[in-house]
């Protein structure tokens, strides 16, 4: 990548017949010059930073009018990339933005690579790496809570504790190295204070690591499979839960032949619900394929909703299915509890969450969502009500930092020379720096920003 280039990309979604506004974004030293060649603003409008101009995009040679548009100027360093940034706000749709983009390319800009605007913001010191990653997470947020966590990252809520931890480690390293270089001129190292400082750093590192699983859940969502034998009400449960007729419901066993999906939000967590085919022995070739897919869905799911019929009780067929899914996190759904002649049900001791529903009447859905939330909370202790959350890359770096700091602590306990302390301290400092982007390699940057969309 050449920071001297001026880059351009479409920065808004292009949807035929739906998008009302399309944005073409330029960033770089030639951004304003290119805009001046293409944009004609009538009257005495001033080309000043953070001012919106009205006018027309015209071909610089043929003078043909391409679009009526607004032009937004954001001059360096007061822009997202800390470079001169110009945005053409055109009419939406495919043709206006594509034509404006092509004119920018013909007049000296090059097409931006994925994430290059955010990468330039990072390289120019406008944001750190945690903020850049949070930008991508905000764009891809699947729930209000995941959006809030991403926004907190953009605002530096994660970067600040990482900077503080790294600063504390640097202070300890400076104290140790000073004793190595000027042993005769300084008082002995206060090892008790060093141990206390390391303990404080490790405690914060542990707190940050605890946000990883919950953060990943908010980002990627929870995969939930509704599993059971035919005609226990699995499809009715999906329809009641999603408040739609996603699945066909009849009194005939085996109606659902394949996995039906629905996307929901449960207490801030994105949930992908899979309604599976009823599991039973069958000679029907198509149904047999559906049963196989159901079993695979239950294995791939984060949580299984094992559904039985209250009127039939816990049958031998239910027991056979339970034995195939009991190794997964599981909630027992006892459906059709409004029917008469209900059979007594002996619930296995391994099942801790039981919800009674009448799916056909949309009863028990709130209790089901509460049980799902409780299951999640029990699996991820201490990670509720997140202000921010680390991602997998950050968790890996924090884990390396933790291991190095624990090694320093062990080295101190073994009374090894101070030189040994510094090795692991530097490793911890380097790992913490990688989180915010200090000392990060070009290959890591390429891997991170290649996942961004082109206009971001």
Image (cartoon, grey):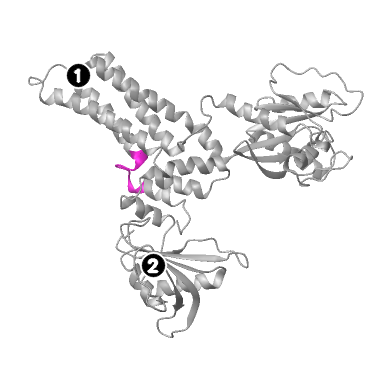
Identified at 87% across, 21% down, the residue is: 343
Q: Is residue 441 visible?
A: yes
- Say which of 372 and 328 sits in front: 372
Q: Is residue 352 above or below residue 28?
A: above
- Say which of 192 and 439 sits in front: 192
The residue that label 2 is drawn on is 110
For residue 20, what is the image quadrant?
bottom right
Identified at 80% across, 39% down, the residue is: 236
Q: Is residue 398 above or below residue 42?
A: above
Horizontally, residue 445 falls left or right of residue 148, namely left
Horizontally, residue 127 falls left or right of residue 452, namely left
- Magenta stretch containing residue 442, yes or no? yes
Instruction: Write down the region rendered in magenta.
Output: 434-443
The residue that label 1 is drawn on is 417
Sequence-wise, the earlier of marks 2 and 1 is 2
- Tally of numbered tags: 2
């Amino acid at each position: 990548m050449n920071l001297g280039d001026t880059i351009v990309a479409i920065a808004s979604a292009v949807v035929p017949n739906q998008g009302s506004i399309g944005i073409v974004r330029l960033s770089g030293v030639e951004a304003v010059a290119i805009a001046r060649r293409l944009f004609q603003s009538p009257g005495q409008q001033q080309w000043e930073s953070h001012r919106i101009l009205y006018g027309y995009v015209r071909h610089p040679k043929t003078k043909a009018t391409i679009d009526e548009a607004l032009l937004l100027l954001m001059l360096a360093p007061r822009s997202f990339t800390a470079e001169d940034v110009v945005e053409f706000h055109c009419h939406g749709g495919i043709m206006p933005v594509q034509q404006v983009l092509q004119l920018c390319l013909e007049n000296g800009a090059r097409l931006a690579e994925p994430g290059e605007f955010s990468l330039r913001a990072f390289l120019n010191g406008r944001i750190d790496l945690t903020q850049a990653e949070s930008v991508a997470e905000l764009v891809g947020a699947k729930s209000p809570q995941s959006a809030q966590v991403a926004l907190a990252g953009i605002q530096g809520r994660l970067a600040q504790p990482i900077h503080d931890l790294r600063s504390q480690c640097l202070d300890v390293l400076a104290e140790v190295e000073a004793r190595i270089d000027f042993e005769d001129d300084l008082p002995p190292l206060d090892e008790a204070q060093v141990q206390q400082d390391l303990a404080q750093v490790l405690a914060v590192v542990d707190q940050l690591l605890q946000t990883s699983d919950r953060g990943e859940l908010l980002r990627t969502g929870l995969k939930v499979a509704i599993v059971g034998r035919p005609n226990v009400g699995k499809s009715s449960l999906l329809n009641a839960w999603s408040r739609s007729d996603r699945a066909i419901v009849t009194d005939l066993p085996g109606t659902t032949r394949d996995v039906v999906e629905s996307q929901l939000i449960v207490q801030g967590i994105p949930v992908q619900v899979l309604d599976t085919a009823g599991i039973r022995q069958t000679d029907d070739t198509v149904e047999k394929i559906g049963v196989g897919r159901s079993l695979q869905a239950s294995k791939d799911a984060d949580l299984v909703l094992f559904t039985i019929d209250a009127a039939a009780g816990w049958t031998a067929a239910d027991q056979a299915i339970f034995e195939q899914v009991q190794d997964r996190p599981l909630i027992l759904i006892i459906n059709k509890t409004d029917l008469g002649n209900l059979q007594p049900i002996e619930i296995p001791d391994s099942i801790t969450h039981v919800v009674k529903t009448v799916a056909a009447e949309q009863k028990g859905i709130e209790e089901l969502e509460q049980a799902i939330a409780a299951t999640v909370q029990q699996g991820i202790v201490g990670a509720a009500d997140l202000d921010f959350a680390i991602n997998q890359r950050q968790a890996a770096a924090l884990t390396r930092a933790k291991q190095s700091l624990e090694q320093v602590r062990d080295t101190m306990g073994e009374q090894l020379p101070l030189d040994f302390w510094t090795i692991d301290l530097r490793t911890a400092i380097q790992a913490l720096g990688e989180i915010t982007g200090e000392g990060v390699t070009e290959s890591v940057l390429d891997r991170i920003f290649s996942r961004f969309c082109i206009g971001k």
